[in-house]
Amino acid sequence: MKIFGDKGYDLKAIFNAFGSNTIIPLGKSASTRSHGSPARARIVKLFKKISEKEWKESVQYEKRGNVEIYFSGLNRTMGEANNAARPDYIAQEIALKVQYYNIMR
């Protein structure tokens, strides 16, 4: 499993939890001395060796856009709110919305 995110998710806790499966572009001032997150430090070193465009191609960052497009369409069509109150009913409601949206596409 890979975790895709934008620069807003550049957090040590996320890199520590998911390690090298984290596909998040780093800020321009990202330091290789990432204390407390060896996984992030490794990614920073790679990120600094090649350009941001090359990095995005190497990790297939464009897949993140496909996911965002899907969820944007799902929310526009089905709405962002859930009517259910119980967690198990919320899960059922979301599953039904996803199934219905996939049929509509």
Image (tube, grey):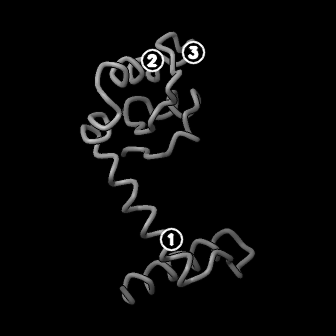
In percent of the image, x 49 and y 26: which residue is there? 28
Dot 1 or dot 2: first in sequence order is 2
- Secondary structure at badge 2 equals helix
Mark 2 and mark 3: span between their CA atoms? 9 Å
- Mark 2 and mark 3 lie on one chain; the one further toward the N terminus is 3
Q: Which mark is residue 41?
A: 2
| Gap between marks 3 and 1 measured at Cα | 35 Å
2 in relation to 72, above or below: above
Instruction: Give the CA separation, mark 1 to mark 2.
Output: 32 Å
Residue farthest to the right, as pictured: 85
Q: Residues within 10 Å of mark 2 (few under 14, many from 20)?
A: some
Q: Using the image as rendered, state which of residue 42 and residue 94 is in the foreground.
A: 42
State yes or no: discs 2 and 3 in contact (Cβ < 8 Å): no
Which residue matches tag 1? 72
* Of the image marks 3 and 1, the number of the one nearer the N terminus: 3
Name the kind of residue labelled 1 in the image.
Ser
Quarter of the picture containing the C terminus is bottom left
Is residue 9 positioned above or below 71 on the image? above
Q: Residue at x 57, y 15 (%)?
A: 36
Q: Is residue 86 left or right of residue 37?
A: right
Residue 72: horizontal and vertical position, in percent? 50, 71
Q: How many marks?
A: 3
- Give the number of the disc on residue 103: none
Q: Is residue 1 left or right of residue 30?
A: left
Q: Amino acid at mark 3?
A: Gly
Instruction: Give the labeled residue for mark 3.
Output: 36
Residue at image x 34%, y 46%? 61
Q: Foreground residue, 86 or 4?
A: 4
Image coordinates of residue 54 in percent, x first then y, are 26, 35
Q: Position of residue 49 (x, y in %)?
A: 30, 19
Image coords of residue 99 (percent x, y)? 43, 82
The local secondary structure at tag 3 comes to loop
